[in-house]
Amino acid sequence: MSARISIFRTTPRIVMGPGSVAGVGKEALDLGARRVLVVTDPGIVDAGLLDPVRQSLEAAGLEFSLFSEVAPDPRYQTVKTCLGVLEGDKPDCVIGLGGGSPIDIAKTVAVMLNNAGDISDYCGVDLVPKAGAPTIIIPTTAGTGSEVTPIAILSDEQEKLKKGVVSPHLMPRVAVLDPELTVGLPPAITAATGMDALIHAIEAYTSVGATGMTDMLAARAIELIGDNLRTAYARGHDLQAREAMLEGSLLAGIAFANAGVTAVHAFAYPIGAEFHIPHGVANTLMLAPVMRFNLVGNLIKFAEVAEFMGQPVEGLSLREAAEMAVEAVWELADDLGVPKSLKQFGVTEEHLPALAQGVMKVTRLLANNPRTITAADAEKIYRQAL
């Protein structure tokens, strides 16, 4: 029997299916909204994905303002810029539309509507004093799972590190998952975001914070993503694969929101912040080296990951089966054409000591890792990814 107490949280309302974005106006009305802020990025606007949201809000008779200037790896300043655009005209609901960057800005802007100071004041765990405006999150990638997490990640340019704001006040009120919004994703983005979702699931499953509930969700997420990511990448118009990927990302998000991610993300944050490597790619670059290091921390769980990914583990020793999990993710990344070497992004041997020190600052995630990591270990793991 577990000696610890666990708490399970998730988004209270999840709406999923083709065409579900058409109901976002009603969802906002049900939250008591009269004026809405929509947060997104220029690519979403150019792709026409804002149109069904706009139409639904207009049909519901809602006033809304738009902030569409979110850039990848958003900085603290982006939150301040968005709040400044509002000019005191405070919305009572915030909609995040897009990938992880617009969603994280939507969630942080929403809490800053009711909290003083700067968003950097709240980096850490449970530091946000009061609830913000309710949020409705509409992901356009099957990757972050941020529609069901109490977490937002922002870049600290001064420290060259990504930092998390973690608070139950960041948990969205509604998630709307419409696979039709993901059909037009380019293959490279499908690959990187899909690998990110898979990594969320694997890390949640192997985290020391895992529970029976999170294991159930993470295992199903690994199966769904393992079975459908190649199809979504190779045949982007396949709506069934796209919906399965959204479901896998969702389940992985619920799992890691409660179990926590581990060292893969801790290693991805410094390289993402300093070398501006997209988050899903940064995670993928570090996945196999970190998994290989972590195997001995929980051979049983890693062997099960291999099985969930369809690897032929019958008749293998526990160690051999666990190693098959590393082979499976390496082959998947290869099939998807995701970069697998830090050298491709200008990282050299000289950068490794500083990057390793950056990893050691991400104590929130390292605490979940199935194997203790030292700075010397971190440097060796980065070296394996060169």
Image (cartoon, grey):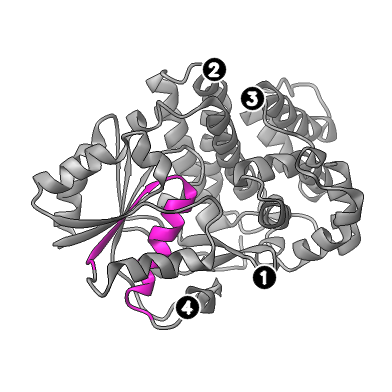
Q: Where is mark 3, residue-wise?
A: 336
**Residue 203, percent across and down?**
64, 48
Asked if residue 281 is positioned above or below residue 271 in the image, the reply reads above
Q: Where is mark 1, residue-wise?
A: 158
Give the amino acid at mark 1: Gln
Q: CA distance from mark 1 to mark 3?
A: 34 Å
Give the amino acid at mark 2: Ala
Give the amino acid at mark 3: Leu
Asked if residue 31 is positioned above or below residue 60 in the image, the reply reads below
Helix or strand or loop: what does disc 2 sit on? helix
- Between residues 305 and 232, which one lies in front from this camera angle? 232
Q: CA distance from mark 4 to mark 3?
A: 39 Å
Q: Earlier in the sequence, mark 2 or mark 4?
A: 4
Q: Earlier in the sequence, mark 1 or mark 2?
A: 1
Q: CA distance from mark 2 to mark 4?
A: 43 Å
Is label 1 in contact with label 3 (beta carbons under 8 Å)?
no
The answer to whether residue 254 is seen in the rendering is no
Q: Earlier in the sequence, mark 3 or mark 2?
A: 2
Is label 4 in contact with label 1 (beta carbons under 8 Å)?
no
Helix or strand or loop: what does disc 3 sit on? helix
